[in-house]
Image (cartoon, rainbow, N blue to C red):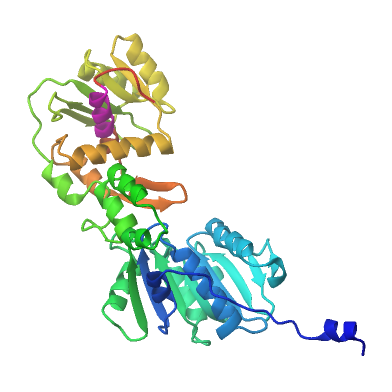
């Protein structure tokens, strides 16, 4: 056999080298526990570290032809992110990619599969040799149950990572069991300060986040500390502290949320000190609604929902002499409005009466999306009173000017 032929037939040798990780990151993931749970700050390196762990399991420790190694994201679209990052981080000769199925087949035959946890039934069936559950606090509990069943035959290890999101989720509860030292489990908390110390995050960026986010959101996203109010963005203590009877003061600003379908029309007026001095909540035909809103507002500056069917109502109010401006609700504008209300409540700048306003405020929660934090009311509940209150706070803050969305 010639030298060239011998060289071509010789087995190829690949060298695997673990990427550089900082000590807390490595200790949290690369340990002998079967279940490692990591509550961590945003952008602290938990995803990169978990990608390295899953790759090492597939290449070095447990891999073989056809063996499955899964990455579970909350929804399928999010699974594309680590899939693309893994492809970028590996030499092209180190895998065969199936972009349609989001799989990478490694030289030893192991298969890295990136899946969404939005359909739990699709996760049953296969034998899985190791797995990562990403953003676990947002993954459905039934998807975790499905994944756990796939690890039964192989006794495969799993790494569960994510931000803290209140206390009402399976990841939080399982983390507490791991933190208590349950056999087979490890627990780690990685904060923004750990990441700053490792040079992964900028201290200035963290301080900016502290200044611009409500305290409860900042503490969960960056300090991995669950809020005592189970994820309410306004803070249950603050909500209750700011409850007060309606005053007899003169209104300086109004917020109006108009009914849609089975919702309520709500009118909230605030006096010069930010105290609620007018509150109406009703359902009525549009003609009656317009008349009642006109009587309530008088000539006081008001900010009114002008989304969809609200637009012609705002025009009618303006033609009738009301000092009203329209506000178009969209995901970004509503989020901005809610964040302003959260700041006002937490800083003691607004009060409101007990009843529907307080009930709606307490029903709010926040969720983390690919574009940031979004406040929303729990499924099936109303947020008309909160929207009207937030509009009134915005109107008062603008001093009755017309510089609105």
Specify the farthest residue to the bottom.
1
Task: Please tell me which residue is depicted at 42% across the width and 57% down the height of the picture.
Answer: 43
Total count of labels: 0
The spot of residue 274 in percent (x, y) is 15, 29
The spot of residue 227 in percent (x, y) is 24, 57
Task: Please tell me which residue is depicted at 31% across the width and 51% down the height of the picture.
Answer: 365
Specify the farthest residue to the right.
2
Task: Please tell me which residue is depicted at 44% across the width and 51% down the height of the picture.
Answer: 369
Residue 144 placement: quadrant? bottom left
Residue situated in front as seen by the camera: 231 or 56: 56
Residue situated in front as seen by the camera: 211 or 235: 211
- Please report the bounds of the magenta region as a residue range: 388-398
304 over 168 or under it: above or below: above
Q: Would residue 74 be seen by someone viewing this image from the given angle?
A: yes
Task: Please tell me which residue is depicted at 36% across the width and 19% down the height of the picture.
Answer: 314
Residue situated in front as seen by the camera: 13 or 346: 13
Q: Is residue 394 magenta?
A: yes
């Amino acid at each position: 056999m010639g030298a060239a032929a011998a060289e071509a037939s010789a087995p190829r040798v690949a060298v695997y080298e673990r990427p550089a990780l900082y000590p807390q990151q490595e200790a949290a993931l690369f340990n002998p526990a079967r279940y490692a749970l990591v509550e961590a700050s945003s952008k602290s390196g938990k995803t990169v570290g978990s990608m390295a762990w899953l790759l090492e399991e597939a290449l070095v420790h447990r891999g073989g032809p056809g063996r499955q190694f899964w990455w579970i994201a909350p929804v399928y679209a999010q699974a594309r992110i680590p899939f693309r990052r893994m492809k970028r981080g590996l030499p092209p000769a180190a895998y065969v990619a199936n972009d349609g199925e989001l799989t990478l087949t490694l030289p030893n035959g192991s298969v890295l599969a990136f899946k969404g946890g939005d359909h739990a039934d699709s996760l049953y069936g296969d034998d899985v040799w190791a797995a990562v559950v990403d953003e676990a606090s947002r993954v459905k509990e039934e998807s975790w149950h499905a994944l756990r069943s796939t690890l039964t035959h192989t006794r495969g290890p799993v790494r569960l990572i994510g931000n803290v999101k209140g206390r009402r989720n399976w990841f939080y509860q399982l983390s507490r069991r791991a933190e208590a030292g349950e056999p087979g489990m490890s627990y780690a908390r990685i904060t923004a300060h750990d990441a700053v110390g490792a040079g992964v995050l900028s201290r200035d960026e963290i301080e900016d986040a502290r200044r611009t986010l409500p305290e409860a959101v900042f503490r969960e996203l960056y300090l991995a500390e669950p809020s005592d109010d189970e994820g309410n963005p306004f803070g249950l203590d603050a909500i209750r502290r700011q409850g007060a009877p309606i005053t007899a003061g003169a209104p300086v600003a109004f917020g109006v949320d108009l009914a849609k379908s089975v919702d309520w029309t709500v009118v909230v007026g605030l006096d010069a000190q930010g105290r609620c001095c007018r509150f109406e909540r009703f359902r009525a035909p549009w003609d009656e609604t317009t008349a009642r809103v006109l009587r309530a507002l008088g000539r006081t500056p008001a900010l009114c929902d002008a989304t969809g069917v609200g637009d012609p109502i705002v025009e009618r109010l303006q033609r009738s002499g009301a000092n009203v401006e329209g506000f178009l609700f969209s995901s970004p504008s509503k989020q901005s409005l809610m964040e302003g209300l959260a700041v006002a409540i937490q800083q003691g700048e607004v009060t409101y009466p007990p009843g529907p306003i307080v009930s709606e405020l307490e029903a709010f929660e926040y969720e983390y999306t690919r574009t940031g934090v979004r406040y929303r009311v729990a499924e099936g509940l109303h947020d008309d009173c909160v929207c009207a209150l937030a509009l009134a706070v915005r109107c008062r803050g603008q001093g009755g000017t017309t510089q609105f969305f």
